[in-house]
Structure formats: C-alpha cells, structure tokens
Amino acid sequence: MKLYENGAYLLNGRDVIIDSPEASAEITAKTGKSITSEDAKKETIAYGILSNHNTSGNMEKLQIKFDKLTSHDITFVGIIQTARASGLEKFPIPYVLTNCHNSLCAVGGTINEDDHMFGLTCAKKYGGMYVPPHQAVIHQFAREMLAGGGKMILGSDSHTRYGALGTMAVGEGGPELVKQLLNKTYDIDMPGVVGIYLTGEPMKGVGPQDIALAIIGEVFENGFVKNKVMEFVGPGVANLSVDYRIGVDVMTTETTCLSSIWRTDDKVKEFYEIHGREEDYAELNPGEVAYYDSFIEIDLSEIKPMIAMPFHPSNTYTIEELNANLMDILDDCEKRAQVSFDGKVDLDLKSKVRNGKLYVDQGIIAGCAGGGFENICDAADILKGTSIGADEFTLSVYPASTPIYMELVKNGAVANLLATGAIVKTAFCGPCFGAGDTPANNAFSIRHSTRNFPNREGSKLQNGQVASVALMDARSIAATAANKGYLTAATDIDVNYSKPKYFFDKTIYENRVFDSKGVADPSVEIQFGPNIKDWPAMSALPENLVLKVVSEIHDPVTTTDELILSGETSSFRSNPLGLAEFALSRKDPEYVGRAKEVQKAQKAIEADQCPVEALPEMKPVMDAIKAKFPEAGQGNIGVGSTIFAVKPGDGSAREQAASCQKVLGGWANIANEYATKRYRSNLINWGMLPFIIDEGELPFKNLDYLFLPGIRAAVAEGATEFEAYVVKDGELKPFTLRMGELTPDEKDIILKGCLINYYRG
C-alpha cells in the first residue's frame, strides 16, 4: 500500500500520474490536452455528485440537500422530538425509521417497544417508512431498498456508507437530519477527495474486512483521509463482487473520512436488477483526467488475513504476524488497556495462550459489516462438516436482513452452520455496540463487526468486569471456529467456496414494512411511552461565561462510547435527562455529579437569583473576575461546565455524546483536535463551543474555573481566537482558546443556545 500526500491525476480511470512539476507535460503528451489540477478536480465522481446536490452556487461552501434520510431506534426519537419542537409538519423527503439497535426489548421495561411504537405512529403521521425489529439492520435495508446511483443519503448512524452502490452517504448526528426535515441544508466546505486505486485480486480466503482493516491501519493515526471523501477506482474494483465492495466500504467510517464513493459497473447493475430496482442504477466513473487531492495505491493480492486487536480498528496486524509474535503483541495490548482503563482493571490476554496458540472465547459474524450474504455463505462452507466444540468457544451469526436470512435457509447455509454448534440469529446491531452476546469477564471475542472500542463489548470497569474484542473477517472467524477456537487464518485451510447466487425476495418487506409512500396523515396520534421526554429548556449564550473544568481526559483518542455509553444505556436514549446520568460514567464516574453541581449556578441565574448563593465556591472566583472586569455580573454572565480531552469524538455519530453534556450544563469542550467532523457538529448543534487549545502543558487543571469575557460578541463577530483566563487564588491568568471558522447558521445556533432554540426563532 502506497500513500501519496501530494495528490495524483488519473487518466481514463486507469493510468496514474503522481503530481509533480512534470505532471502537466506528461498529461498533455498522453491526452493532447492541457488541464489544470483545479479543472481536473471537477472530474472526480465525488465532485459530480456533490455539485448535483449543492444549493449554494459555490462549490467551496456547500449547502447540501439529501435525497433520503435514515435512522434507527437509538436516534430517531430524539430527532423527531427535536424537529417537532421546531415546527415539523411532514417529512419532506423519504425518511426510513429502522429498528435494529433496541430490538431485544430486554431491559428498561416497556421503554424500547414504546420507542418503536413512537416511530410507527410518526411514520404514519409525517409520511415515512417504518422497518420493524429483526427485519433488517439499518444499512442493509438502505442497500436493498434506498440506495441509488448518483444519489446522496444522510443517516444518523456513523456507518451510513453506500458508496459501493454509487450512493454518497454521510453519517451524522441527529441535528443534521433535523435540518433536512425542516428543509434546511447540510453546510460544509468542499471536502478533499482521496483516490483509492485498487489493482490485483484478493487471494483465496481474504475477505472484505481484511482489506478494510489493512486500509484503516495505514490511514487512521496519520489522519490521511480525515473528513475527506474516499473514491475507489482502478482496475481492481472489477475483481470484487458487490457484496465484497460493500464489506470494505462500510468500514471506511473507521478511517474518519466524511464519505465514500466507488466507480460502478455491470456487477452493480446486476445488484439493482436482483433487488428489482434497475432504474436506480447509474454508471459512475471519473472523467478522462481526474485529480485527487491525495492518493492511495493498493494491490489487493498482497493483503493477508488481518486482525484489529483491542481496542481500536486501527490496531492492526496480519494474523500471521500476531501468531509469530504472540506474547509481545498481547503484552502491548495489555499495556494499552492500562492507559484506556486508567489502571482500574487488569486485562490478561496472555492467559489466552495455550500450547503456544491463542485461544478465542467467542466468534461473532454480524451487522452491517459481517452479516452480508457472501460472508455467511463462505463461513458456512468453511465450517461444513466440522464442529465448534463443546468448550468455551461459541459462534453466533446474524444475517443483516430477513431476505438474506431466508435465502441462507433456502440454500442450506443455515443448516450447515447450525450443525456445527453455531447459533444463527435475527438481524440485530447489538454485538457491535455492547447489547448482545456480551462475553464473560476477561474473555476474548473475535468479530466481523465494525468496532472494538473499550466498553462496546459490555465491560463495566467499575464492577471489575472487562472483556476485549478483536475485529476479523468472517472467513478467518469461521476458520478459527473450525479449529475449535484456536486463532486461524482462512488462508491456512483448504476449502471450495460454493458461491451460490443470491435471490432477493421483497415479499417479506411488503408484508411487514410500513410504507406511507410519502403521504402524511395528520390525524394520527403519536404514541408516547412514559420514558419519552421533551428536551429541557436551554439558555442562549451569555455575554460573559464562567466555566468549570469538570473532567480532564488525556487518552490519545476519546470515543463517543466513552462520552456516553452504548449497550444497556440505549434504553434511555429517548429521555435526555435520564440518559445524561450515564455520561462519562465509566471513564470519569465523578463527571455527572460535578457537572450538576456547577449547573446549580446557571439555574439560579435563569431564576433571576444569585449564582454565588447557589454555588458558594464561586464567591472567590467572582470576586477575582470583578476585580478585573467590574462590569461582569448578574444579568450578563452565565455559568457552566466544560471537559478537556485530547482528541474526542471518534466513532459513533450519536448526538447524545454532546447533548448529555449540554443538559447537564455543559457550555463547551476544549480539545487539541476533534476526531471527527460529526462530533464537532454535534457540539455546535447543541449550542456548545468547540474550542481548540494548542498541544502541550495545559494552562488549567481539572476543577479549575475559567472566565471568557465578551464571548457572545466574539462568536457573533466570527472570531477564531478567544481571550480566556484561569481564575485561581484571586488571580486571572490569561491564555488563548481557538475555534475553527463557523458558518453563519452555526454562529446563530451557538448564540441562541442550541438548534431547537434556533428554529424556534
């Protein structure tokens, strides 16, 4: 794999010319044309799709309107509640509500099914689609029923990726979907486009997860594709089936790219034909001379079976490398865990080594990444006639949709899997986010799913419970299962893959999925459960702001799962204050109490009372502030909390990572950088200031008070640098905070306190 930071030209989709002073002359010699890089940028597939969806008239400042929206049952209640509070009358574009996260309805009493009934009645009232639990995971339904060549889809799940089908899809926090529901736009600067040039053909036994993990391992840490569009081109694309391409594509989220798109061909056309949607196919290719801002060359034939060790998809090794250096790599993972877990619990992976081999406790093939038809068919072929054994090792397989499940039943794959001792379950995202197949304490799980962050497998460090997940391809998981739990690469076994043809039967969806056909019925009464709560009132940004630092996190990356837990807490996702009780609860158990204590002062201000009386520790802070800024005081000041994290926001698009801080009185985050564009957007949409501070020793410590004079005026004026002070020991010590440029709408959202206030006017 080769990475080129300085960009490259692609001629006729095949010939690569790396950018250099001689590149223009070489292009002219080969094409007879003189073309600038700026003109050639317009010849990428991504540029064409973005141009067709941009309403601003300025391709540097995009204002995108999407063709369709999709959400699942962890996010759609909050989105619709926010939109309702902002004046929603009808879904203006197709909006699909799937139910694949809170499917089990196993915790929280009636909470989860109440959310589902909320979704069904909203689909009827506002004119949407509703996919009942166990029918399909969100992204598989979108592939089967929503994607279209040259289209754009916005989803409130970070793995919203349908690029292999010719659809540019973006995963964002819920407020961005609210904007689309209210006929507003998705506003971003024109993203860079990275060419992913594929050659060769994968070796037998290498699956899409192996390709994906190899890419993630190369580009995550250096931010090579961060907030950019990955465009897959080159002759190697034709050597991959569409199912295979989908498996690679869905994992592009873990690179922190903005979106993805692939060139399309007759194989993609056949996919649409199989699904009865021939009219949705479009042939997509880059122009005669296309320019990419940066470029990656990948020879597919060189990729070997991969494993992403705990606790990140970028912590990658070849399985061959892991087995050859087993104790050293496991020791390194244990040391990383000490950092991630703040030394609260010991992870003991080396005890998993038996007779020099790594023993695995659990295998999972599931969700939008692993649950595809070809993945499961190949796994069934590997396992046919074997046994997974009667020891600790278990294997669970989750087809990504009921149509896939039915075809696997018809072609015998399910019978082959069940005969080995594996269990085949319904479409469900739970194993990916800690709500299904939770391993035993100190167990080691291998999964063809999307993430292996801490806590996503169900660990509860405060209870001394810890487990770990490694990501692998379904084929190597099946090979490991056939070897009764001893880690084995699929390339180490001999198998004849049957490669059965897929037949899609839409009757299942016609019988169960509610489709309004875009017709709203205002007479329908929305069904609310007792846990579905409205958002609490939120104040506008004050003239001056006092912040208390209530959590300080120095991990290299802080995921959204650490900011707000996944797993069983998902049952409270429709209750803003109830869910907020779980914020940072495993990373910093004292955060919630500290934030609520500071919030007392702001609540006093909102009640026209003295904040110092509500929070006496503020008296010396206010005395010091008034000594330098005598005009600052009741009537022009606000009080709230903030956290510091080195690089927060990797992972899920869930807006609750920000909204939970907001409802607890959070006014800001301070970071060296933000891991993803979507987390920064979530902060802004909840009225929180996304501050940046230079790397190095911090001018403040946890529990310090900060003062930001004139913050409202500075934001209104579009400032990117902000005067700030640490208030301590009767003194104000100055330092500087920065913030990336805000769009006019983003400024107004922050000034008004949140997106809901912005739309209320």
Image (cartoon, rainbow, N blue to C red):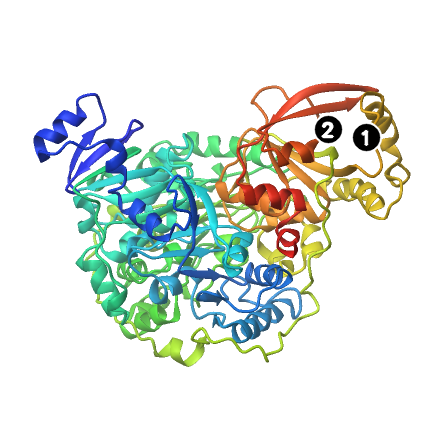
Q: What x and y, as percent, mark residue 279?
A: 25, 67
Q: Are marks 2 and 1 in contact (CB under 8 Å)?
A: yes
Q: Residue 528's x, y, as percent? A: 66, 71
Name the quadrant containing residue 524.
bottom right
- Give the residue pinned by disc 1: 632
Query: Is residue 123 something one can see in this rendering?
Result: yes
- The residue that label 2 is drawn on is 709
Q: Which mark is residue 586?
A: none
Above or below 389: residue 729: above
Q: Which residue, as the protein is rendered here, is positioned at the far right?
A: 613
Q: Position of residue 731 (x, y in %)?
A: 80, 18
Q: Residue at x 37, y 33 (%)?
A: 224
Residue 478 picture quarter: bottom left
Q: Is residue 361 above or below residue 182?
A: above
Judging depth in this view, the residue of 162 and 66 nearest the camera is 66
Q: Residue type at mark 1: give it.
A: Ala
Identified by mark 2, the residue type is Pro
Residue 565 on image: x %, y %: 60, 49
Instruction: Please name whichever residue, 523 or 388, is drawn nearer the observer in this view of the structure.
Output: 523
Describe the element under mark 1 as helix, strand or loop: loop
Q: Of all residues shown, which one is farthest toward the front? A: 57
